[in-house]
Image (spheres, grey):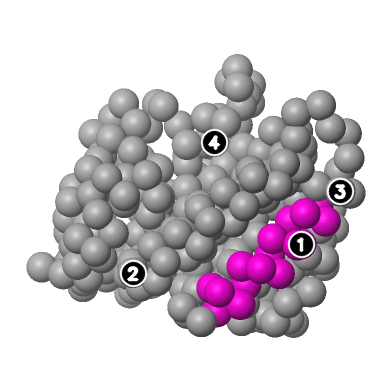
Amino acid sequence: MSAAPRRELERLSLNQETVRQWSLPELADGCARAGVPGVGLWRAPVAEYGAGRAARLVRDAGLAVTSLCRGGFFTAEDPAARAAALEDNRAAVDEAATLGTGTLVLVSGGLPRGSRDLAGARQRIADALGELAPYAAVRGVRLAIEPLHPMYAADRCVVSTLAQALDLAERFPAEQVGVVVDTYHLWWDDTVAGQIERAGRGGRIASLQLADWVTPLPEGVLLGRGQLGDGCVDLRWFRERTDAAGYDGPIEVEIFNPGLWARDGSEVLTEVAERYVRHVLRTPADASVPADARGDAVEPGPADG
């Protein structure tokens, strides 16, 4: 049984990787109890549980699947590897459709081993999208290109800016290919405000994902995302910009952090919800006004005692 979402949490979605220590049933139950209405899922745990079973589990908990991660990795030069990637992405589209989400997040792929050809890699991404987008559209799934921070360009994603993602997406109808605005990957880019506006004008924003940037980065950098409010990203600014651009969909918290995974999942979720309200929704002026004076009282989180 799902609790009614608190008004302040009505757009919040918890990405599965933020509480990797939880099983799918624990994730569904925890979010339902906390009044968090959405979950972002990952393919490996969904496959282990079974996509059909996962869809029923989430639906029965009264939740929505806001995205599925991930498809992509389109940049191989070898024809057999490219064909295998396309087949795997068709499977990912089918899984997204089964789960009832219209958003398949794409991590496009890095440079093939020994290659320095960024332009060629990006063209292979465009070619793959051309094959996959119609397939996904028939199944009610939109491909969502996620630009990753440039430090991932060599091995994970040669699409490093929102402008590059939009240049690819705009080759296709907006209902077929959109983009992900992820604060962790885009906070540093001084062109991002204009690119969010561009994405909004074209109806291209498929997802807003949140994580903070903390330093020093860990060795390997992949698992260095910070809890909301712990780093230097102006999270509220991204929410306000995407709102102004016309995006009113889920706001998904996706944090890869072993420190969070070592904690109790319910405690992490409570903290995420409290940080989301404080750092994403409220203005500094709001934060100085007692909750009862605003008429939207918030349950205390760990930082509130």
Front of the two marks 2 and 4: 2
Task: Name the kind of residue labelled 2 in the image.
Answer: Thr
Q: Nearer the viewer, mark 1 or mark 4?
A: 1
- Cα separation between marks 2 and 3: 33 Å
Q: Residue at x 57, y 42 (%)?
A: 212
20 with respect to 131 (left or right): left
Which disc, if any, is residue 225? 4
Q: Residue at (86%, 48%) from the top-left corner?
A: 120
Label whose residue precedes the other's in the sequence (2 or 3) = 2
Q: CA distance from mark 4 to mark 3?
A: 30 Å
In this view of the protein, which residue sits in the foreground, 233 or 104?
A: 104
Disc with the residue nearer the chain's start (2 vs 4): 2
Residue placed under numbered mark 2 in the picture: 98
- For the N terminus, the quadrant is bottom left
Q: Which residue has dot 1 on it?
A: 126
| Circle 1/circle 4 CB separation < 8 Å | no
Callout 4: SS: strand
Q: Could you tell me if residue 220 is visible in this image?
A: yes
Q: Is residue 10 above or below residue 265?
A: below
Q: Look at the image and say whether residue 173 sits in the magenta stretch.
A: no
Instruction: State the residue in front, 150 or 247.
Output: 150
